[in-house]
Image (cartoon, rainbow, N blue to C red):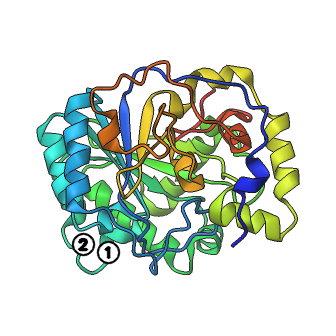
Amino acid sequence: MHATLPLLVRTDFPPIRRRRLETLQVNLGYVCNQTCVHCHVNAGPKRTESMSLETVNEVLAYLLASGARTVDLTGGAPELNPHFRHLVMTARDHGARVIDRCNLTVLFEPGQEGLAEFLAHQRVEIVASLPCYTEELVDRQRGKGVYETSVRAIRLLNDLGYGKEGTGLTLDLVYNPQGAALPPPQAGLEADYKRILGERWGIVFNRLLTIANMPIQRFGSMLISKGQFNPYMKLLREAHREENLENVMCRSIVSVDWQGYVYDCDFNQMLGLPLAIAGKRRPHLSDLVGRDLEGNPIVVRDHCYGCTAGQGSSCGGALA
């Protein structure tokens, strides 16, 4: 795999600083039942990295100490971590909002029986990957048969109340472009998703989140192989909008990797760019206890243009 960090080191991305911490985004490991072309984590079935119970409990302790009110669980497939349900239940018992970034097909993996019902019972918000509303494009990006299984999973979630008005069970879908292009306007594409999936499958959901592909890890390596890396970076730079800097996700989250080390965002985590703390070369969650991060400089490189280009992009979808 081609390394992209050397191509991103020199940057003129504007300096930005952190605000009050609101969210812990926790990567529970790189184990996944899918191998997606656009994956910035390089996750897959052959990965073995998985957060230990000791580190999960450190996450929970810091959640209480920090005052953060949201836990955003990601991977890989976060549900494949053996301590996923313990983390969810404990965080919910403490009144935290919990988001599960779900690839949908994991609901039918061996050993995951009752997972959908568990998520509904715990009132976990689901952000589910469905990079297109057509079978051909989803299977091209995520693997043969993924579209059919994803539709079955959404219908199961709908049967439990997810995505339906008045239930309080949130189901958001995620769109990623198929290649080296920016996402289209979020509102218009959401309307298309709701119309087509509703007519074809009777599916309902709350929001569509459009997220730009980051030029790192598997997707970045693919760009290099095809000679598209520099043109894609040029596209991101030229589409940069200064106003998006106000709402980039790194201002209010701390990203935690499977070993408990901390970063400004999930993308920096994948590039090995740790959160900047004086005297700490690679700060751990334990180093943050009692420390106020507000005003702390955020580590930036050229990939940050992926979050500010066009309508903007974050884990919560478009910024503009």
Horizontal side, residue 177 vs residue 191: left or right: right
Kind of residue at badge 1: Phe
Kind of residue at badge 2: Gln
Identify the residue at horizontal 60%, vertical 46% (top origin): 211
Identify the residue at horizontal 82%, vertical 37% (top origin): 237
Q: Position of residue 24 (x, y in %)?
A: 36, 39
Q: Tell me which corner region of the image, top left, top right, bottom left or bottom right, holds residue 39.
A: bottom right
Q: Which residue lies furthest to the front in this view?
A: 279
**Residue 71 in view (yes/no):** no
CB under 8 Å between discs 2 and 1: yes
**Image quarter (top left, top right, bottom left or bottom right) of the C terminus:** top right
Which residue is more in the foreground, 202 or 297?
Answer: 297
In three-dimensional space, the C-alpha distance between marks 2 and 1, rounded to whole angstroms, equals 6 Å
Horizontal side, residue 217 vs residue 92: left or right: right
Q: Which mark is residue 108?
A: 1
Q: Where is residue 172 in the image (x, y as percent from the top left)?
A: 43, 46
Residue carrying label 2: 112
Q: Which residue lies furthest to the left in this view?
A: 93
Q: Mark 2, mark 1: which one is toward the viewer? A: 2
Horizontal side, residue 296 vs residue 138: left or right: left
Identify the residue at horizontal 71%, vertical 43% (top origin): 184
